[in-house]
Amino acid sequence: MSVAEAAALDDATLVARSRDGDMRAYEQLVRRYQGPMYRLALRIVGSSGDAEDAVQDVFLTAWRRLGQLNDDGAFLGWLYRTTTNQCLNVLRKRKPHADTELDEHESPAPRTRPDRAVEVNAQLDALQAALRGLTPEQRACWVLREVHGRSYDEIAEAIGTTQQSVRGRLARARAQLAEVMAPWR
Amino acid sequence: MAVTSDYVLPCGRDVEEVWEAIDLSDEHTRSCPHCAAVRESLLVLRAATDEMAREEVEPPFDLVSRIMSAVRADVRRSDVVPLPGDGLARISTRAIAAVLRYAADGVDGVRARGCRVVEAPESTGSDPVIEVELSIAITASLVTHAAYEEVRRRVLAAASARIGVRLARLDLVVADVLEG
């Protein structure tokens, strides 16, 4: 059995137990996936406060809807979809120009790690800033595919569109981001 | 050379074409300055993206406990039924079950076993409604057909008189028959 299969099996067990009301099992699922969901949310909504709220809502909703999940092993994909949806809803509810209220200097992590070259930190900051220039759907497509490695099929379902449209948005996002990164070449 | 706004380069190639062939440097890419420039930008983007994917930004240390508090509060909420009035008072379904079991026990030859209480879909704060599945064990020699009606009557009465909620549905299940 591959590592991936073992992990999927384990999720399925925890999901089945959670559905029976076992909160300790559910807490293990929360511990396992809060990190990737938080990072996804942070990259899409761009502010840590909104990302925390989104992730909290996602795990509460997931708990309430465990009964609707047909395939216990599909929990992670389901989390990715729910988190993406939640983040896009947060962005839709934001007032126009609310982006300017975001802390422009807020970045996901302090770029002060000594083991990383100054230039790499600066490039990451530039990429982070460039992501804000994309539409929310483009940003979600790009982050899900390029940073989190999700499938086109899964992304299409999360965004509520076709695979073809996902590929189009990705191409436009990539071209736009490459343009912003041009000064670093 | 900057990427053109419609993402088609002056040489006619699309940025996406350059991306797809980024690791296969063909004759055109080697000689075309537009493609070469875009390829360099895409390589920078790819490197920065890899860094972003490796970046382990951790959520706040208390996020798990906040999530689990919300889940526990949700479980507590789903386990109670509103009492009539201002909508602030609530009663646990377990407390309701205890009252209803006691009411059924009052009938000769009947012993309540399981009692599952759920709030009915039509229930509101001002008009709380419940649905109940009550399983009973009966002592065959003591129970007549009228006893079931008596159980039903007492349970319905206890729900409205002792608790104040309307019982919309009562499923009575004989789970066991005792000799004696």
Image (spheres, grey):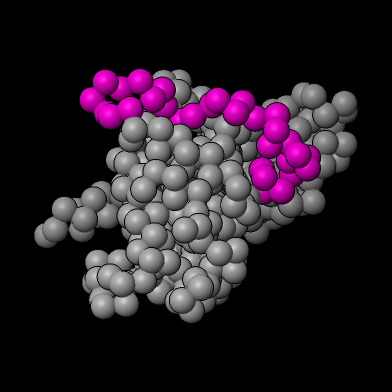
Q: Which quadrant holds residue A137?
A: bottom right
Q: Is residue B90 visible?
A: yes
Name the one closer to the observer, B163 or A154: A154
Query: In the image, is residue B81 above or below residue A136?
Result: above
Q: Which quadrant holds residue B78?
A: top right
Name the one closer to the observer, B55 or A179: A179
Q: Is residue B147 visible?
A: no
Name the one closer to the observer, B134 or A2: A2
Q: Is residue B85 magenta?
A: no
Q: Residue A105 placed where, x, y %? A: 55, 25
Side of B100 where A170 appears, left or right: left
Q: Residue B141 placed where, x, y %? A: 51, 52
Q: Main secondary structure of the magenta part?
A: loop
Residue at left offset 27%, top offset 55%: A8
Name the one closer to the observer, B43 or A45: B43
Q: Which quadrant holds residue A153?
A: bottom left
Residue at left offset 35%, top offset 56%: B40
Q: Is residue A101 magenta?
A: yes
Q: Residue B34 placed where, x, y %? A: 42, 66
Numbered disc total: 0
Q: Residue furthest left?
A: A1
Residue at left offset 54%, top offset 52%: A139
Report the magenta residues as a range: A89-118
Q: Residue A58 placed where, x, y %? A: 54, 43
Residue at left offset 67%, top offset 48%: A89
Side of A135 where A142 appears, left or right: left
